[in-house]
Image: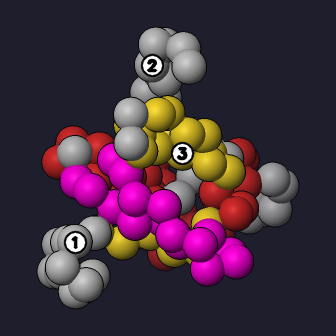
Amino acid sequence: MSSDKWIEVPRPNRTDKARVQNPSSRKAAAPQAASTGPAGNRTSYVQDAFYQHLMSERALVEVVFIDGEPLIGVIDGFDTYAILLLSQGEEILIFKSAIRYIHLYLGDGNTEKNV
């Protein structure tokens, strides 16, 4: 596999989306349509924060696929559609659409942990 690393995509300024308008300014402002396009048009801050936390901690995770198959490794990168997992010395590209869930792996059969 290649030794190239993924480039971290800069996150947009959250204050623009979190700003609350005064009731008087709502009348003058044009209504904004919600993003209904592909997942790339819409940023998921919860998902980004979750992956960033796991990457910064180099936490061992278990990725469980739609068919129930688990894969254990460390998340090395992610983008809108995929994650890069380091598992048993290999870099594995996993499409997010194939994932059922991801959780911390403790190795003793107990997979629950407060993060």
Binning the other alpha carbons within 10 Å of mark 2 as few (below 14), some (14 to 19) or many (20 upward) gives few
Q: Name the residue under label 3.
A: 83
Quadrant where the N terminus is found in the figure: top right
Circles 1 and 2, Cβ within 8 Å, touching? The answer is: no
Name the residue that disc number 2 marks.
5
Q: Residue at x 47, y 34 (%)?
A: 90
What secondary structure characterizes most of the magenta part?
Answer: strand
Q: Is residue 36 visible?
A: yes
State the residue at coordinates (34%, 61%). 61
Going from the N terminus, do you reach mark 3 or mark 1 first? 3
Residue 107, image x, y percentages: 22, 71
In space, the residues marked 2 and 3 are separated at their CA atoms by 12 Å
Q: Distance between the residues labelled 1 and 2?
A: 27 Å
Instruction: Decide which of 107, 20 is in the foreground and name it.
Output: 107
Q: Which amino acid does label 1 sit on?
A: Gly
Q: Earlier in the sequence, mark 1 or mark 2?
A: 2
Question: Can residue 30 be seen by looking at this rendering?
Answer: no
Is residue 62 one of those drawn in magenta? yes
Residue hosting label 1: 107
